[in-house]
Image: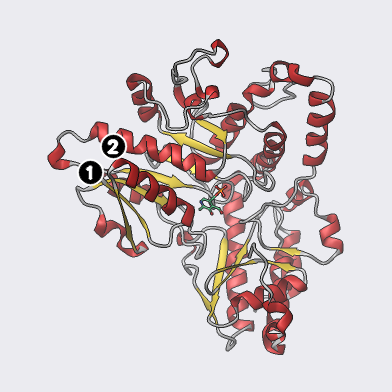
Amino acid sequence: MTTRSDCLALDAADPLAPLRAQFSLARADDQGVIYLDGNSLGALPAATAARVAAVVDDEWGVGLIRSWNTAPRLGGPRSGQAGWIHLPQIIGDKIATLIGAGAEEVVVADSTSINLYKILSAAMAVSVAQTRSPASARLQILSERTNFPTDLYIAETLAQAHGFKLVLADADDILAQLNDHVGILMLTHVNYRTGRMYRMTDLTKAAHTAGALVVWDLAHSAGAVPVDLKGADADFAVGCGYKYLNGGPGAPAFAWAHPRHVAWMDRAGWRQPLSGWLGHAAPFEFTPDYRPGAGMARFICGTPPMLSLAALECGVDTVLAAQPYGGLAAIRDKSIALTDLFIALVESRCEGHGLTLVTPREADDRGSQASFAHATGAYQVVQALIARGVIGDFRAPDILRFGFTPLYTRFIDVWDAVNHLEQVMTTGEWREPRFNVRGVVT
Ligand SMILES: Cc1ncc(COP(=O)(O)O)c(C=O)c1O
């Protein structure tokens, strides 16, 4: 069994180890915090506070409204293209390199939920346009029963409004449910509770063979696992800025559509349902009628949040900084090593305490998290761990969830976290009444 000194040696040999210095973790480290929740809220990048302060003090404080056109670009893509107004596309281009999309194909805007509303609307419109006769109408949106609730709620609302039907299947049953009624397969690449990861290329191919389009939610994969949207021939995607992209609480999200669908939108003059003024082809003409902006620009709705975008860019940059160290392939290798180690240590050291692995054991089938079920005390065990500084989270009804962010999670963190977990379980500490008090956010 791996020892604590083995973990120290693994950290010493870790090619990604220098990237941890990109994060402002010193004070948390001093308090003994072991952070295993970057799949819910990524850690604070060291650059963020100064960057946001500069946007506030200089660009807002001095530049004032001029900054929409003049705020300087200090490097990166479109270097020299001054002005806040370009930031949704500039950051979109950076995220594109992490998810196998091209330049000008990704926009950053709104939340994942809102982007899904817009993107799923686009998918429905494309599907209807592609479906030739009413006899073969494809009016089903197929998704997974345990998909993240927002995805199901948004799909349900859109389905009701447009005469579609949301059909839910178990993860293992998705392929069997692909039939000629399904217009859209909508899946989250990595499941938020179990960490199960779908094989994007295979499923996209199966859906296309069955005549359906595919919408992928990358909330738990962007920045954590290699994603190749175009290589997989995916149709649409949305994703989150505050998890593995480290963009800060409530960071703006992103949206992508394959250029073949964007070309159709341009040809058809398709307008997304949240047709706000900044998605207009010429917002500053202030015309009373709506004309959608070209390409992905139409998916912007209102004024982009500059402070949040500045923070998001710092977060995305922490992932891009892995490039010289092997990029997402190296991140993935370390993620698998961390999760394998965590699973092995929990199963050996906490045996007999009712913890059951719910994350797939096969590395190719899981994202960068490991989840265990505990029938009676999942919430309390997580609270007992948090009281010791080991931060994971609880997902109802019975899941303890631990996320591993290879940019800053160390092997020693894994070892120490399991050490705490073993103590919490063997002493029965988690049964103390104080761990049964529920906050709003779990
Ligand atoms: C898979 C998935 N999709 C969507 C969301 C919702 O994101 P937002 O609250 O930013 O709209 C989450 C949030 O955790 C998520 O995990």
The amino acid at mark 1 is Arg
Q: Position of residue 34 (x, y in %)?
A: 75, 65
Q: Is residue 227 visible?
A: yes
- Image position of 29 (left or right of 231): right
Q: Position of residue 172 (x, y in %)?
A: 34, 64
Residue at left offset 57%, top offset 30%: 93
The amino acid at mark 2 is Ser
Q: Which residue is mark 2?
A: 127
Compared with 170, 428 (above or below) is below
Q: Is residue 188 visible?
A: no
> Outermost residue toward the left?
135
Q: Label for residue 138?
A: 1
Q: CA distance from mark 1 to mark 2?
A: 8 Å
- Image position of 221 (left or right of 4): left
For mark 1, give the secondary structure: loop
Q: Position of residue 367 (x, y in %)?
A: 52, 58
Between 14 and 40, the one lying in front of the other is 40
